[in-house]
Amino acid sequence: MLSPKGRPYIIYRPPPGWGFWSNFTVILQGLDEADRQGMLPVVDMENHPTRYNEDSDELGTRNAWEYYFEQPAGLSLSEALALDPLDNQGSVDGPFTTDPDAVFPAPLLSRARDLINKYIQVQPEILAKANAILPPVVQSDVLGVHVRGTDMRTGLLPEHPIPPTASTFLDQAAALDREFHFRTVFLACDEHETVEIFRGHFGSRLLVNPGHRTSASGSYPSDYHWLFDHQRHHHRYLLGLEVLLDALLLSRCGHLLCGLSNVSKSAVCFSDASQIAHVIPPLWCAPPLRGPSIGRSFLATMPSAPRPLSPLILQSHILELQQLLEITENARADVVSELESLKRRQIADQDAIAGNANSSLQALKEARKELARVKKELHESTSAVKQLQGRILQLLNGWTRLGWKLMPWTKPSWRHKPTIVQSENKTSI
């Protein structure tokens, strides 16, 4: 068996993947495997496209990875495919993809930073955009805030945490600002309303990267059409660019206020040890699609809020938890109602089957009676026919004998003897 050392190693996630930084964790996992085995990592988002892939060649490549990053080992995809490569089989399992914390544990975080420093090269024009907003070093007097909304807030995605409200993040940001007196607050978010409330509090100190945002009151099903089907030239590419810039800029903030998200986790990985992360725990964690509740055990592993929550925010959390409880109770009522409906339908089906069986049995009984009647009539008809046959033969015999006695001529040649008539009691000649 050939040694994997020195061979190309194709890394991909089965299409269409999920969010930008969720896909990145799979790539990070593949980089870790390639690095440990001495292989040459190559990312393939051309033959295994993501939601960020554009349909045209206008961006110079069909490989969505190369929209944003250089190939990790300087080897192109076409070159790698010509060299009998190995690949990660589309695996999405590993410590980088399954760790639920907002920040990787220290050993894993250190490994992630090593892999990023060794293999991840942001495209120069994108890096220039980030540098024009914040210098490429950690700014101790800048607070970065990442607020995750939309489907994570309202979708109840299986095994995903439910982030607290934007007002909770503002409450904690204000508390941190009173303590550290930040020069700038950089906000990364996906809802218009979040920008409005932060700007209302921080005014001109607020820095926001322009990008695509939606309303907090929208509907966000898990199919992602609401996000990726927007009519904007190169919309899919721009979505990736915007969230990449957000993470790069968050990584340059001296303090990072965040929840549980791959965006903020990736920002910490791109940053260095001088950054201080302040993690707000989620309100709850949605259960698996077909499994029991995991919210309480999940929250037991989470740290408390960075700073004491205000009474107003605590009241809003209670209100939201009540709303989640209402959703759960309504879902339970729907299930119970559906179960009762199914039971009624089952009883009706059983009654129908029993009714059909009784009807069939009655029809069988009637058929058997009719058969018995026909058999009786047939027997009686058969007896009558036999009696009639005997009577006719008797008459014929009687006429023949009389003719022999009365007629003067000789017995005809065709009649040598009388017809024999058989009856039940005797034989007549």
Image (cartoon, helix red, strand yellow):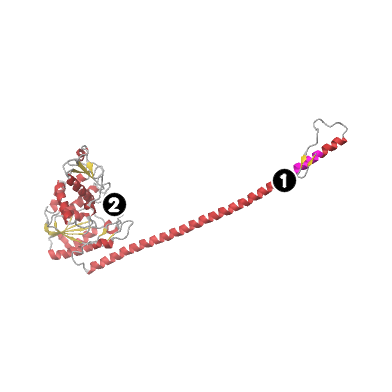
Q: Which residues are magenta?
A: 380-397
Query: Residue 8: image x %, image y %?
Result: 19, 41
Query: For this view, does 109 lie left or right of residue 343?
Result: left
Q: Which residue is mark 1?
A: 383
The three-letter amino acid code for the residue at tag 2 is Tyr
The three-letter amino acid code for the residue at tag 1 is Ser
Circle 2 SS class = loop
Mark 1 vs mark 2, CA separation in Å: 87 Å
Question: Which callout, 1 or 2, points to the residue nearer the camera?
Answer: 1
Query: Residue 312: image x %, image y %?
Result: 23, 68
Q: Is residue 65 visible?
A: yes
Total marks placed: 2
Specify the farthest residue to the top. Answer: 413
Query: Residue 4: image x %, image y %?
Result: 19, 42
Q: Earlier in the sequence, mark 1 or mark 2?
A: 2
Question: Is residue 383 located in the magenta-colored stretch of the structure?
Answer: yes
- Front position in the image: 177 or 340: 340
Specify the farthest residue to the front. Answer: 426
Residue at 54 percent of width and 54 percent of height: 357
- Which part of the image, by quadrant, shows the N terminus? top left
User: Taking 336 as reference, is 73 above or below it?
Assistant: above
- Front position in the image: 305 or 364: 364
Q: Which residue is mark 2?
A: 224
Circle 1 SS class = helix
Specify the farthest residue to the bottom. Answer: 311
For residue 348, which numbered disc appears in the image? none
Query: Residue 47: image x %, image y %?
Result: 25, 42
